[in-house]
Image: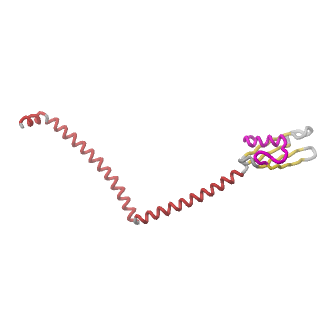
Amino acid sequence: MQELMMMLNKNVNLLVLFAIVLGLIDFIVVIVINSKYTKLKNKYKKLIKELEIGDVVDLLAKNISKNDEFNEKLEKFRKELSMIDNEMKASIKKVGIVRYNAFNDVGSDLSFSIALLDSDDNGIVLSGIYGRNETATFAKPIVKAQSNYPLSAEEIQAIDKARKGQR
């Protein structure tokens, strides 16, 4: 027993240092636990405050109702977007213009062909032929970049420009 007491007396400084380190670690653990407890307590107070307004069933019913309203509005927007998308596909998106001189005796490029196409290459090609004594205008339907009516070289060129996004 005396040997144990002598050994303790020799290492008192070390034992005190060890006790201080353990105390510091204990203090840090207490601070961490306290901060977590404070956060949890705040969440609990918030939940209790919400529950005082109404019971849990009422809160769930309100949330489900809001969710249903949101889903109805979302479905409405999807239908409207689909309608707009369909309308946009049928709108004129591609335009090609070719100006040319239809007759040698007429100066300048006063004749023209204009192709107006949608995203599926459907639409019309308009041609205006300018001569000294008369002017003629033609319109031909276009389906998939083709027409049932004969197309002039300028009309074909206007359709090609429209399909390539050139003017």
Q: Position of residue 76 (x, y in %)?
A: 59, 59
Position in image of residue 28 (x %, y %) = 27, 44
Instruction: Classify residue 73 by image quadrant.
Output: bottom right
Q: Magenta segment: does it hold 149?
A: yes
For residue 44, what is the image quadrant?
Answer: bottom left
- Residue closest to the eye, 150 or 33: 150
Residue 6 position, x and y percent, is 8, 34
x then y, percent, for residue 71: 54, 59
- Coloured how? secondary structure
At x 92% / y 38%, what residue is drawn? 105
Q: Quadrant of the C terminus?
A: top right
Q: What is the span of residues highlighted in magenta in the rendered image? A: 142-167
In the displayed structure image, the side of residue 105 where residue 125 appears, left or right: left
Residue at the limit of the structure toward the right, as seen here: 133
Does residue 78 appear to the left or right of 134 in the view shown?
left
Q: Identify the residue at horizontal 25%, vertical 42% (top origin).
A: 25
